[in-house]
Amino acid sequence: MDYSTLQIFSCPTYSLVDSQKRNKLEFKSKKCIFIGFTKGVEGFRLWNPKKRSAFINRDVIFDEDSMLREKLKTEDKTQDRVSDSSPADTQKKGS
């Protein structure tokens, strides 16, 4: 089994828009969300939140690093909130 194509589900992706479906001033890619694989098809299943539709595309760039950075930021914020409230503070609030 080949695991080299596995990706993180729900990570941000950038899907290439075919040159025949866009004009000269439009972006070459659109931001989507990876939702899975399709059996028997060489491509990734993506969700376009702006159009609220799913589609399959082979030309995709995965932005897993930004997803992991966001997760680390939220974990740091929750740790800061926990460290801000010391046991002495919680005892004062309880009395």
Image (cartoon, helix red, strand yellow):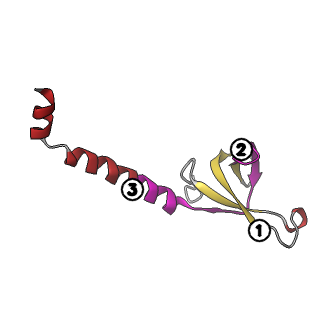
Residue under the image location 59 percent in, 55 percent down: 12
Q: Real-space Cα distance between discs 1 and 2?
A: 27 Å
Image check: 72 left or right of 41? left
Q: Disc 1 residue type? A: Lys
Q: Are marks 3 and 1 in contact (CB under 8 Å)?
A: no
Residue under label 1, please give it: 28
Q: Distance from label 3 to label 2 (Cα)? A: 35 Å
How far apart marks 3 and 1 lie (CA) works out to 30 Å
Residues packed near mark 1 inside 10 Å, few (<14), some (14 to 19) or many (20 plus): some
Quick check: 37 above or below 91?
Answer: below
Circle 2 — which element? loop
Q: How far across and down, in percent of the image, does residue 74 sit?
A: 39, 50
In terms of depth relative to the viewer, which is nearer, 19 or 26?
26
Q: Residues within 10 Å of mark 3 (few under 14, many from 20)?
A: few
Which is nearer the N-term, disc 3 or disc 1? 1
Give the residue type at disc 2. Lys
Residue 39 x %, y %: 71, 44
Q: Secondary structure at mark 3?
A: helix
Number of labels in the image equals 3
Question: Is 12 on the left or on the right of 44, as rendered?
Answer: left
Q: Which mark is residue 73?
A: 3
> Looking at this view, is 38 or 32 the one in front?
32
Q: Is residue 65 above or below residue 77?
A: below
Q: According to the image, label 2 marks what residue?
A: 39
In this view, the residue farthest toward the right is 20
Label 2: few (<14), some or many (≥20) within 10 Å?
few
65 inside magenta stretch: yes
Q: Residue at x 73, y 64 (%)?
A: 29
